[in-house]
Structures are given as structure tokens and as C-alpha cells.
Amino acid sequence: MNRHAQLLTALASGAIFGIGLSLSGMLDPVRVRGFLDVAGDWDPSLAFVLGGAVAVAMAGMFVRRRLRNPAFGDAFHLPATVAAGSKLPRSAV
């Protein structure tokens, strides 16, 4: 695999991600605080940004399932599937 192509792809992905954060308003601390303040003056606009991000990620996962190999790699590096045990709810508290 070409290392330069991999680095260029990572740079382009990061740039697109940063531009998306900027355009969506997620870099504005006042807007983020307004979204997190559910008991006060709640601003639900970032929920739509989050929903759009989840939709794009789901579409990417469906496309990945159909591919045998990634475009710039030898194989997909995915975590092993592990069932959530009873420790997970207790550790979240």
C-alpha cells in the first residue's frame, strides 16, 4: 500500500471533519452549552447535527459490509465482537 495515499486520505478526512464541525456550529461553546443544558434553555439544533452524523456513519457501515478490502489498505481492522456483560451498567454509574 502506498503510504502517501494513506496519509493524504487521512488529511482529507480530517479536513472534511473539521469543516463539518465548523459549519454545524459545534465549535461554538455557547451553542454546545445550550445543547447540554436540558433543564434550562435547551437548544436542540445540535441534535439534528448528531442525527445526520449517525445517518452518515450507518451508511458507511453498510457500504463497508459489501466491500472485501478497503480502498487504501490490505484489510479492515475491526474490534472483536464482545457481548456487554453485567459490569457495564454498574460501571456507568
Image (tube, rainbow, N blue to C red):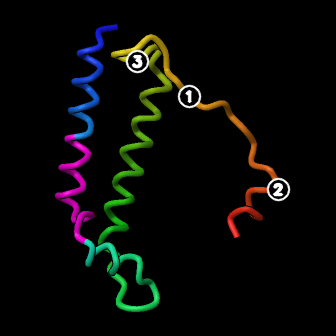
Q: Return the residue at label 1.
A: 78
Counting other residues with Cα less than 10 Å from the Cα at mark 2, is it few (<14), some (14-19), or many (20 or more)? Answer: few
Q: What residue is pinned by disc 2?
A: 86
| Residue at the farthest bottom position | 40
Mark drawn on residue 70? 3
Residue 80 shown left or right of residue 49 in the figure = right
| Residue 5 in picture, x, y percent from top left | 24, 16
The dominant secondary structure in magenta is helix
How many callouts does the rendering have?
Answer: 3
Residue appearing at x 37%, y 84% in the figure: 42
Q: Is residue 65 above or below residue 23?
A: above
> Helix, strand, or loop for circle 2?
loop
- The reply to whether the magenta stretch includes residue 24 is yes
Question: What is the secondary structure assignment of the residue under circle 3?
Answer: loop
Residue 39, horizontal then vertical, whole percent: 46, 89
Left or right: residue 5 compared with residue 70: left
Dot 1 or dot 2: first in sequence order is 1
Q: Amino acid at mark 2?
A: Ser
Q: Which residues are magenta?
A: 15-28
Asked if marks 1 and 2 touch (Cβ < 8 Å), the reply is no
Question: Quadrant location of residue 4?
Answer: top left
Q: Earlier in the sequence, mark 3 or mark 1?
A: 3
> Residue at 22% of width from left, 61% of height from top?
24
Q: Residue at x 22, y 51 (%)?
A: 20
Q: Residue furthest right?
A: 86
1 and 47: which is toward the camera = 1
Is tag 2's residue or tag 3's residue first in the polypeptide sequence?
Answer: 3
Dot 1 falls on a residue whose secondary structure is loop
